[in-house]
Image: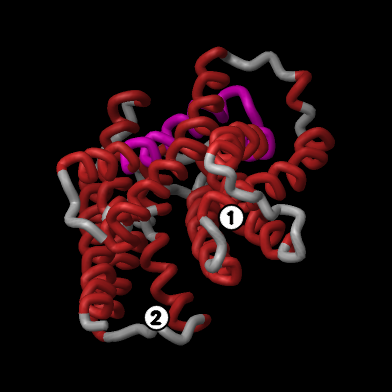
Amino acid sequence: MRQPTLTDYIFLVVLALIWASAFFNIKIATYSYGPVTIAFLRILLGAIPVICLCFFKKIKIEAFSKDWYWFASIGIINLVIPFFLIAYGVQKVQSNLAAILMASTPLSATVLAHIFTDNEKINFIKVLGVLIGFSGIVFLFSDDILINENNIFSALLILGGSTFYVIGGLLTLKVSNKKNENVTASILIWATIFLLPITAYVEQPWNLNPRLDSTISLIYLGIFSTGLAWLMRFRILKNNGLVFQAQVAYLIPIFGIILGYIFLNEIITPKVIVAVIAVVIGIYFVKKSNNKKITSV
C-alpha cells in the first residue's frame, strides 16, 4: 500500500462525516417513518450505486450463486437487524448518544474475534483498550440527562445493533475471497428481498404522509450513508489498506456529537465528553495492538 496523501486523509474525514451524519438523519427520518421502513429504504437506495458500480466495472454479482445463503445471512445480520435496531432506538435517544454507542463496534469486534477466529487473539494492550472503551460506555449509562428509565431499553437496542455489525463482519470472512463490491451488492440485494414483505405487512409505508425533512434524510441515508460511503470505503481500502481505513472509528463519535448539536441542538453533557474520550482511547489501544501485529509479519 502507498503512503497516504492529503487526498487520502480528506477521503477518510469525509467518510467519517458521512457515517457520523447517518445518526442525526436517522433521528429526523423517525419523525415520519417507522424503523422497518427506514431500514428497508436505506438498504434499497444504498444498493443502487453499488450495483451500478458492479455493472460499470463488469464485476459479477453472485447474490444467487451457490454461496447465496452466506450473502443472505450476512445481509440479515449485518444490515437488516442493526439498521432496524438503530432506527428503533434513535426514536427515544439523542443521535449523538447513538454515535457513541455505535463507536463501540471495534471493541466488541476485539472480544468476538478472540473467541471465533484463530489469528485475532487478545493481548494485554487489547484488553486494556477494551476495558477503557467499555468503561466509557458504562459511564455514559450513568448520565441521567441522556439515559433514564424511559429510554434505557432504546439505548441497549442501539448497543445491540453494534454487536450485530460485528457478527456480520465475522460472517463476511466466509466470502472474503470475493470482491468487496460483489459481496456488498449481494448482501444489499438479499437484505432488500428480506425486508420488502415485512415492510409491506408491518408498516405499509404507502399510507404515510411524511414530512419533507424526513424524506430528504431517508434518501440521504440510502444514497450517501449507505451506498456512497461503501464505495468510498472501497477506494480507501484499495489505496491505503485496512489499518488506515480503520482510523475512521476515532472520528465518527466526535463528528456525531458535533453534527447532533448543530442540526438538532442536542445536549452535550460532561459525561458525554468523558465517554467519547474513553471510547477513542480504547479504540486507539486496540488499533495500536493490531498495528504492531501487522508490522511484525
Position of 142 relative to 284 (above/below): above
Q: CA distance from mark 2 to mark 1?
A: 22 Å
In the rendered image, residue 23 lying in the magenta stretch gets the answer yes
Asked whether, in this view, residue 157 is left or right of residue 282, the answer is right
Q: Is residue 62 left or right of residue 97?
A: right
Which residue is located at x 26 percent, y 57 percent? 244
Q: Nearer the viewer, mark 2 or mark 1?
A: 1
Q: Main secondary structure of the magenta part?
A: helix
Q: Residue at x 63, y 27 (%)?
A: 33
Examine the rendering and report whether any part of residue 232 can be seen: yes
Q: Label 2 is placed on what type of residue?
A: Glu
The x and y percentages for residue 249 are 32, 54
Q: Position of residue 297 (x, y in %)?
A: 26, 83
- Identify residue for label 1: 183
Comparing 57 with 72, the one in front is 57
Q: Quadrant of residue 210?
A: top right
In the picture provided, is 41 more to the left or to the right than 28?
A: right
Residue 237, how many percent across, how many down? 36, 54
As drawn, 220 above or below 132: above
On the image, which quarter does residue 138 sit in?
bottom left
Q: For the N terminus, give its image quadrant.
A: bottom left
The image shows residue 227 at horizontal and vertical percentages of: 51, 38
Local packing at callout 2 (Cα closer than 10 Å; few below 14, some 14-19, many 20+) is some
Region in magenta: 16-39
First of labels 2, 1 by sequence position: 2
Circle count: 2
Q: Nearer the viewer, residue 143 or 68?
A: 68
Q: Residue at x 29, y 63 (%)?
A: 243
Q: On the image, numbered disc 2 is attached to which residue?
A: 120
